[in-house]
Image (cartoon, helix red, strand yellow):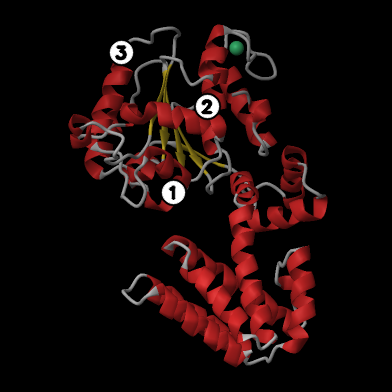
Amino acid sequence: MQFGEIYGNDALKARLKKMVDEDRLSHAILFVEQEGMGGLAFAIALAQYINCTDRGQDSCGECPSCRRIAKLAYPDVHFAFPVNTSPKLSDQEKKKPLSSYFLSDWNNLVAANPYFDSHELYEALGIENKAATISVHEAREIASALALQPFESDYKIMIIWQPEKMNTEAANKLLKLLEEPPAGTYFLMVTQSLESMLTTVRSRCQIIRLQPMEREEIADVLCKRYELERPLALDFATLAGGSIGKAFSLVENADSGSMLDDLLRQLLDASLGKSLPGVLDAADALAALGKDKQKQWCVRSEGFIRKMFLSAKGLEGISFAGADDLQYIKKQVPRIKDSFYPRAAAALDAALRLIDSNVSAKLIFTDLGNRFYLYI
Ligand SMILES: [Zn+2]
């Protein structure tokens, strides 16, 4: 990956290149970002720039090391990230899971989208909902990989994603290396949670913060990449809060999001039309979703109800509603009682709490539908 391929943070690109050119790059760098801002892309581009044999304004992208780093297949650039047991591992591997067992999944994910978030990584590794860690076994692997002479170049680079998932034992194993790394060794770490990092580790790093991208800048990228109309791209960019990775994931998951929003509109329309069969149809459709989708629906719907409430109070400017939502809201709000909004939000909260209990989904959503029908 070249710096030129990364979205945003242009000043940082220039700063990093200058540090390498002037041979004053710290041996332990900690990129601090919010999920999806490109910290990992920066670490890879920096590794490529350090190793490139024909550097210009950027790494050349053509020399053998550039080509192999771009393919994530360079023996002197290593990756470590939090893992746990996964059905993908053999019984033997499950005893001490290591990043290296997951490398092909990791490489595929990074190649497809280096702006992924934790959820996307853990899903790719098959370790969803388990607490992933960087264990002392992993720390031992890191130390032994760095103890070898470089194979192909003068540098050895260890890219660590989410070093905050390192436990104290693992960190202690690495402290000496971080403090006095062997010549030509660089640690490039990427965290989304500086405050949960062990102070012993973070105090040994040079901290580099990524900045959120401007909304307009994100919208430009979305228009090109997905051929979106600009107003829609701006809506996604607003929701992304400066994270290009979040914007990508919002666009790519928009289908399932809009399916959920459609169900809310169906429920609201049937309630307003005093159509009990329509309300029950929407409730049945909701009861048929998986629990995760049901919870997502409750949360999204609460957000939507809040937007309606703000619009009812004449505050649509701060509701961050997209153009399409706003059109719907403006049409329906005059028909809805003011008391509906807090009562609907409370009913959604109650449903959200019940989804994980033993109450049947059909009962939860029929009751919720009934409340919408009565309150509206
Ligand atoms: Zn090169």
> Please, what is the three-letter code of the amino acid marked with disc 1?
Leu
Residue 56 spot, x, y in % from top left: 68, 14
Residue 258 spot, x, y in % from top left: 64, 60
- According to the image, label 2 marks what residue? 44
> Please, what is the three-letter code of the amino acid marked with disc 2?
Ile
The answer to whether residue 28 of the structure is visible from this angle is no
339 vs 65, nearest the viewer: 339
Provide the secondary structure element on which disc 2 rests: helix
Taking the image as shown, residue 45 lies to the left or right of residue 357, namely right
Residue found at x 62% / y 17%: 59
Mark 2 → mark 3, Cα distance in angstroms: 21 Å
> What label does residue 148 carry, if any?
3
Mark 3 burial class by Cα count in 10 Å: few <14, some 14-19, many 20+: few
Provide the secondary structure element on which disc 3 rests: loop
Quadrant the C terminus occupies: bottom right
> Please, what is the three-letter code of the amino acid marked with disc 3?
Leu
2 or 1: mark nearer the eye: 2
In the rendered structure, which disc, 1 or 3, sits on the residue that comes first in sequence? 3
- According to the image, label 1 marks what residue? 194
Residue 196 lies, with reference to residue 103, above or below; the image says: below
2 or 3: mark nearer the eye: 2
